[in-house]
Image (cartoon, rainbow, N blue to C red):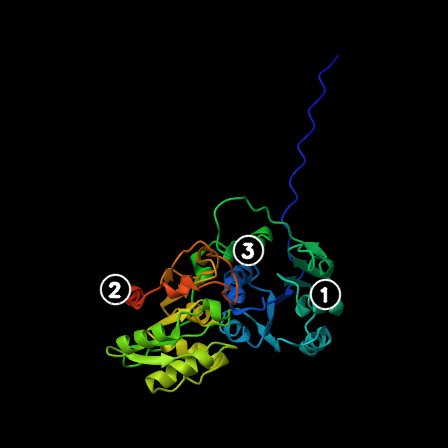
Amino acid sequence: MPEMPQAAPIPDRPPLHLKGGYLAIASPVSVSEASFSIPAVRAIRTARPQGTLVILANQDTAPMWRKVAGIDQVIEHNEGDSVRKIVRLLKEANIPFDSAIAWEDSPCAQAFAKYGIHQRLGYPAEKLAKHLTDPVEVERKIGPIEHQVNHYLLFVEKLGANPFQASNFNTPPRPTTAEKFQIAIAPGSDFGPAAEWPLERFTELAKDISQHCEIAIIPSPDRPGPASSLAKALGKSVTQAEDDALLDFLATCNGLVANDGSIAHYASFVGTPSVVLFGPNEPEWKRPLGRIHRIVRRHVPCSGCLLNKCPLDHRCMDEITVAEVVEELRTLFES
């Protein structure tokens, strides 16, 4: 009996490809997640140089997107806007979108579906999947904690882009820094009080380093109180800069000391070297992008709790000393 021929192997499903030249992308809602998604969007821009690339972003993340080279348009909306309002913004833009990407369930993801964009891509998460036409599966291996930036890079790699290039992590051109060396301090955190170093430590730190440089006090979104308290203790004023002006100001600073939170990610985006204090969050997962930053963390048994308010003794932040932060600042500018 003749030997039966072996069946040809079934090829893997080819990568999904974006349809058409008009692409809408919903920015992640938080500043940290938006900053992690920017390298992936730059990779899409490189892969589709002739396409029209439009970002939908809220008022907190839109200032960053406006500074990303190659973005054709940023449609800004308020964080609390309804799906109907965002659909209206899409209609007003009058762009014949062929495809859309949404990485998380949000009014923007729902608006893409309601507006009728033909191809809608995203991770098949439970709440997001129903708004997608083309769910993108990415196999993740079990192993050590990896940075959240990979959540976005691996997604666009599945679409055929080449995200793992240094150019995707470039910062916008920096303006001339102030004549006198200036360090910004952000004593609050929009991640809540559990992510904040004690105010008396910030006060001691500010008094120490103000002998050698100018100090600028930056309020954190939604939690301006710590910045106001620090300014009062030092007899100084809080820096009044918001949105695009805040990014421009941070870019003129020589450095930043901040809790884990939006200000640290803004500074990372514009390329300002930072010392960032981590408490409930996991720096291997959510640290600001870039090798120019220093992380200060006291790892304790409950580290990685991700809580906004500490139910115990807040030792993860309370045990960080001023001397440690000063030393990290020193090494930051010696490297």
Earlier along the polypeptide chain: callout 3 or callout 2? Answer: 3
Earlier along the polypeptide chain: callout 3 or callout 1? Answer: 1
The answer to which quarter of the image holds residue 17 is bottom right
Instruction: Work out which quarter of the rendered image holds the C terminus and state it.
Output: bottom left
Query: What's the residue at 46%, 81% (across, down)?
Result: 245
Marks 3/2 in contact by CB < 8 Å: the verdict is no
The answer to which quarter of the image holds residue 184 is bottom left
Number of other residues with Cα within 10 Å of mark 1, as a class: few under 14, some 14 to 19, many 20 or more = some
Q: Amino acid at mark 2?
A: Glu
- Tell me if residue 258 comes above or below residue 210 in the rendering: above
Give the residue pinned by disc 1.
117
| Distance between the alpha carbons at the discs numbered 3 and 2 | 33 Å
Q: Nearer the viewer, mark 2 or mark 1?
A: 2
Earlier along the polypeptide chain: callout 2 or callout 1? Answer: 1
Q: Amino acid at mark 1?
A: Ile
Report helix, strand or loop for mark 3.
Answer: helix
Residue 238 visible from this viewpoint: yes
Q: Nearer the viewer, mark 3 or mark 1?
A: 3
| Distance between the alpha carbons at the discs numbered 3 and 1 | 24 Å
Q: Which mark is residue 334?
A: 2
Number of other residues with Cα within 10 Å of mark 3, as a class: few under 14, some 14 to 19, many 20 or more = some
Q: Return the x and y of residue 270 as percentages of the image width and height.
A: 42, 71
| Distance between the alpha carbons at the discs numbered 2 and 1 | 51 Å
Residue 116 visible from this viewpoint: no
- Tell me if residue 123 comes above or below residue 231 in the rendering: above
Number of other residues with Cα within 10 Å of mark 2, as a class: few under 14, some 14 to 19, many 20 or more = few
Query: What's the residue at 66%, 32% (across, down)?
Result: 9
Query: What's the residue at 24%, 77% (across, down)?
Result: 212
Q: Residue furthest top?
A: 1
